[in-house]
Amino acid sequence: MNQEITKVPEKPPFDRSSSQDSLDELSMETYWTEIENIEKSSENRQDQEVVVVKEPDEGELEEEWLKEAGLSNLFGESAGDPQESMVFLSTLTRTQAAAVQKRVETVSQTLRKKNKQYQIPDVRDIFAQQRESKEKAPDGNDSQSVRTNENKYQGKDDQASSLAVGEKELIPLVPEEAPASETDINLVVSFAEQAANQKESSKEKAQKSKDGDANFRLPKDKTGTTRIGDLAPQDMKKVCNLAFIELTALCDIWGIELKQQKAVKIKTKDSGLFCIPLTVLLEQDQRKVPGTRIPLIFQKLISRIEEGGLETEGLLRIPGAAIRIKNLCQELEAKFYEGTFNWESVKQHDAASLLKLFIRELPQPLLSVEYLRAFQAVQHLPTRKQQLQALNLLVILLPDANRDMLKALLEFLQRVIDNREKNKMTTMNVAMVMAPNLFMCHTLGLKSSEQREFVMAAGTASIMHLMIKHQQLLWTIPKFIVNQVRKQNTENHKKDKKAMKKLLKKMAYDREKYEKQDKSTSDADVPQGVIRVQAPHLSKVSMAIQLTEELKASDVLARFLSQESGIAQTLKKGEVFLYEIGGNIGERCLDDDTYMMDLYQLNPNAEWVIKSKPS
């Protein structure tokens, strides 16, 4: 399935993207030289099978979208019982709900035309059912709703953290207290809601001129910044569903359509180094080095380039000789895994050319078949800040293997740029060189006019520039999405609790005894304002810690590591982490600057555990 973004007939307010404007006066010579080098190297390589892409039939596009959003049970044979999606839908923002409604209505119309036996419920009816269930509010024993410490505007019916969707119960587009600076990335409020507010306020042009080459930053969050890899898999799946809907909602604001395609056929090798699917390559490598997440050949090529020194002028830009690169490829295929390849014979520029070739010749692009065109089309968003927000959502949506390799690549590119005074490779120079290698996927058979090529060149180089410059922001999970996950978990716990009570009643259990036991699980022998921190794999003794306004996660860890006995003596900072487990989250690794009092108020039923991160 290929997430292709194309312009819909109605023109958005901007004919040109801010990405293209920023590059109009820059020389594109480096980009076109790289294209020529790629073409020369391709002459000496075997042709690869082109991925066959199937255009979706009417209604299929929206069905695929709903599947990707985790809402497939709103249509088809399970459409009669949409309860599984009720909780999910109740957490959506206004713009997210509009995106869902638009796709559900299209699928509904299509199925009616095809005279399917089952009907799709109107999404407005689904939301209406959700509101009714809220109004009935069973037992009056609802668990504490998710509150965010940042929502200082809670007096207004908890507007910003309320995610109820209905005709009148809508969250405001943006809270009154927005971040202090235009260069601050607001992670508390939905990106699409921010864009809708900006559009309605007619501030687009002013904003466009302000954020041209801004150094964007993330304001400190007292409940801690959540990064990719910090959450449990079940919560990360919810994050991906929400990120997909949020990306669509953001595109909908500006009249940009997410168009899905499927890769129907691709012929690949099942062993070797080059032209091998990333997942196959990693399976092959993990037999050699268990737990490795980055292809071994990719790691070795980066090491070889760095061994030659990152101060070399023209690094990544100057190509190796095409014939020599072809011979090195053949030799690597034969000797790399045997350990007999002579790396001393590989010149630094040859290693750089091999690295770019490896990326280009992945059968499916590093940015994935599903999202390559979405990455390309980020340039159509009107401001750099919104482009960065879209890139953040896209990085979240990438498969793990692609995301891990992209991170390793961007970190390496930054190390090259750190030596720009000597190697003359600025961020834009590196972006110009790398953009064709990431965005021009020959296996998809992309063809375009000369004019469109120039626009794509300027746009993709600008997107590459953004990804390198702001890579630290891209691996952050927005706070508003984490809060939506917390809300979903809270509502699911309510349902489970209600079901359990019914079951216990049927089994003639002492309900009062159960409820007392249920209450005691969170209150047992822990005084108010005190948390009990456990490290079951490291220590038999738990620590009772008094919460204060200034206590951070790093302080809790430092106290544990300062213990004079047990395994804590042998551990160092960075080997173990403090986790928030249970309550309204599955599991979350805390960053050092998390203020424990603020997080405790957000999730009072959590357990606090010190452990190492899974490899």
Image (cartoon, rainbow, N blue to C red):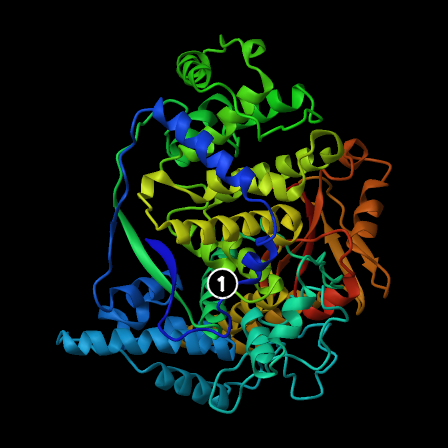
Circle count: 1
**Residue at the disc numbered 1:** 380
- The reply, left or right, for residue 99 in relation to residue 263 is right
Residue 162, x across and y down, in percent: 59, 80
* Residue in the picture at 73% in, 36% down: 418
Label 1: few (<14), some or many (≥20) within 10 Å?
Answer: many
Q: Quadrant of the C terminus?
A: top right
> Does residue 501 show up?
no
As drawn, 442 above or below 247? above
What's the amino acid at mark 1?
His
Q: Is residue 576 left or right of residue 348?
A: right
The answer to which quarter of the image holds residue 82 is: bottom left
Q: Residue 390: image x %, image y %?
A: 53, 60
Q: Nearer the viewer, residue 255 or 338?
A: 255
Report x, y in % for residue 231: 58, 53
* Location of residue 512 with respect to 598 vertically, above or below: below
Residue shown at 78%/31% (left/top)? 570
Depicted 438 relative to depicted 273: above or below: below
Residue 522 sits in quarter: bottom right
What is the secondary structure assignment of the residue under circle 1? helix
Q: Position of residue 568 (x, y in %)?
A: 78, 37
Q: Nearer the viewer, residue 219 or 8?
A: 8
In this picture, is 184 found above or below 200? above
Who is closer to the viewer here, 141 or 276? 276
Could you tell me if residue 18 is visible in this image?
yes
Question: Which residue is drawn at the image coordinates 40% and 64% (left, top)?
Answer: 69
